[in-house]
Structures are given as C-alpha cells and as structure tokens.
Image (cartoon, rainbow, N blue to C red):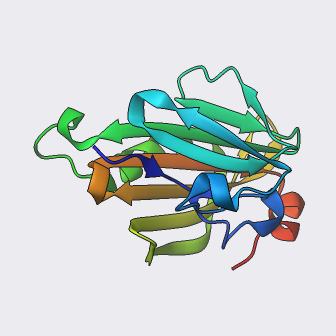
Amino acid sequence: MKKAIVFLLLTCILFSAVGCSVLEKADSLLKPTDVVFAIDSYQLQITADSSFQEKTAGSYDLQLTNDRCYISIMAYRYMDLPESVTPLDVYDMQNEDLLGKRTAVAVMEETKTETVSRHTVTQTLYSAEKDGVKNYYASYLVDIPDSETCAWVLVTAMPSYLKDNREY
C-alpha cells in the first residue's frame, strides 16, 4: 500500500496560518519550522507548524493543539467499514455524534467537496456551544482512494481564531 500523506486541516489551502500543507514529497518540501505527526497504523503523515503539539488522543487516532485550536483525527480503512457504509457515511455519522452533544448548532458554511491532489476533501463549518462556550467546528473528510483510507478531521477553535486563520 502506498504511503498516504494527508495535509492537516487537510487543506492548508483552507487554513494557511494554522501552518499545514499537503505534501507529496514531505522531506523535500518541509520548512524548518514544520513538524511531521504520524498515524502509523494508517500510514498517514500530517504536517503542522511547530506551534502544534501532540495531545493525548483519547478516542482519536491523533489530536494536536496549539492551545487556541484543536485538530482531532480519526482514520479508517475501507475494509474495516461495514459493506453498506461509505466514507461519506462515516463523515455524516461523526458530525451527527459531535453536534448531538452540542447546543445552538448552526451551519456556517454548507458542505462542499473538492479534489486536492489525489484526495477528495469534503468540509462543513459549524458553530455550536458546549458548556456555555461558543466554538466553530470545521469538519473534514479526507478520502484517499489510492490507499483505501479515509480520515475524519475536526478543527475546533473560537470563532475569532478560526476566522482570522482560515483561507477560503
């Protein structure tokens, strides 16, 4: 199986200031301040700027934070999904589970899908509250057909931080 390289926020086209990028040849493209984080069991590598640190992941395969933003990743192999479940179904189920535990949920940006490199990226931006705190939740599905793997990525931050650090 080819080694899949995913970009954090899987879309540094979307989050340039967060310091992420899609890397086809990681070693030659890394900036001195970039750090590579791996999810070895899924052969995924995620790059982020050095402000991000790995956090104990809990139920996630990888969780990163820079104390103002959290990036949480759950990866899946196609073969581990039930026959009737697609990567897009995983995306929908994860979003429903997350938002079902929040109040004042609103869609800030409708779901859109685009192809980036060899990956299909689906994304939706939500606003919601938990324990009286308002956050934005940028939810992504990165589908990597070449490696028969997909990843659900959740970026959680205060609305002002995400607005200031997100490219469209």
Front residue of this view, candidates 135 and 56:
56
Q: Is residue 12 left or right of residue 92?
A: right
Q: Is residue 67 left or right of residue 147?
A: right
Residue 70 showing in the rendered view: yes
Q: Position of residue 44 (x, y in %)?
A: 48, 42
Query: Is residue 2 shown above or below 113?
Result: above
Q: Is residue 154 left or right of residue 142?
A: right
Instruction: Choose top left, top right, bottom left or bottom right for residue 117.
Output: bottom left
Instruction: Choose top left, top right, bottom left or bottom right for residue 28.
Output: bottom right
Residue 100 showing in the rendered view: no
Residue plotted at (52% across, 53% down): 6
Residue plotted at (52% across, 65% down): 123
Front residue of this view, candidates 159 and 34:
34
Q: Position of residue 81 (x, y in %)?
A: 22, 38
Q: Is residue 9 left or right of residue 162?
A: left
Q: Position of residue 17 (x, y in %)?
A: 83, 64
Residue at the extreme front: 28
Q: Quadrant of the N terminus?
A: top left
Numbered disc total: 0
Q: Quadrant of the C terminus?
A: bottom right
Q: Position of residue 100 (x, y in %)?
A: 52, 41
